[in-house]
Amino acid sequence: MIIGKKLLLAEDDNLLASLLRFRLEKGGYQVTLSKDGKEVKEYLAEEVPDIIVSDIMMPYFSGIELIDFVRNELGSKTPIIIISSAGNEENVLTAFELGANDFISKPVSPSELIVRVKRELNNAKI
């Protein structure tokens, strides 16, 4: 059996996290779910996922801080997709300036997320 790509899903909304995790696992990804920024940092200290999907608004450590942490402290080029209901222009621009690869506004379509995850993983191979 082929083990899927490792995906870190950082989302504090339990219902959305369950839905996205289910669909991503069905799509063949090995999903680790973190419900807040503290769990994200603990995970990243031990593992390097193939891709990160993160909400912007999370307890302890926001998605914006996560991008900054991954790019500048860890020096990692791991693709990062941000999902957020706070899709105001400032958040979007800040996310991209710090190194996010993609931004999806909520409500998130699980099918669209899978397409975007696949695209980022393919781009990362180039």
Image: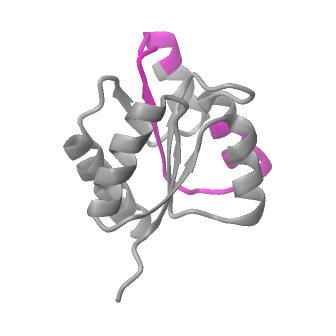
Q: Quadrant of the C terminus?
A: bottom left
Q: Is residue 89 left or right of residue 40?
A: left
- Is residue 66 visible in the rendered image? The answer is yes
- Is residue 102 visible in the rendered image? The answer is no
Q: Does the segment drawn in magenta span residue 38?
A: no
Q: Quadrant of residue 121?
A: bottom left
Q: Is residue 36 above or below residue 71?
A: above
Q: Is residue 20 left or right of residue 74?
A: left
Q: Quadrant of the N terminus?
A: bottom left
Residue 116 lies, in percent from the top left, at 29, 48
Task: Check the image and name the residue furthest to the bottom.
Answer: 1
Residue 22 lies, in percent from the top left, at 33, 52
Q: In the depicted view, which residue is nearer to us: 3 or 78?
A: 3
Image: magenta residue range: 66-91
Q: In the depicted view, which residue is nearer to us: 91 or 11?
A: 11
Q: Is residue 90 above or below residue 22?
A: above
Q: Is residue 26 above or below residue 92?
A: below
Residue drawn at (23%, 51%) of the image: 115
Residue 88 lies, in percent from the top left, at 43, 10
Task: Check the image and name the residue furthest to the left.
Answer: 111
Residue drawn at (22%, 42%) of the image: 112
Q: Is residue 70 left or right of residue 78?
A: right
Residue 95 lies, in percent from the top left, at 54, 28
Residue drawn at (66%, 35%) of the image: 36
Residue drawn at (56%, 30%) of the image: 97
Q: Quadrant of residue 69?
A: top right
Q: Does the segment drawn in magenta span residue 90?
A: yes
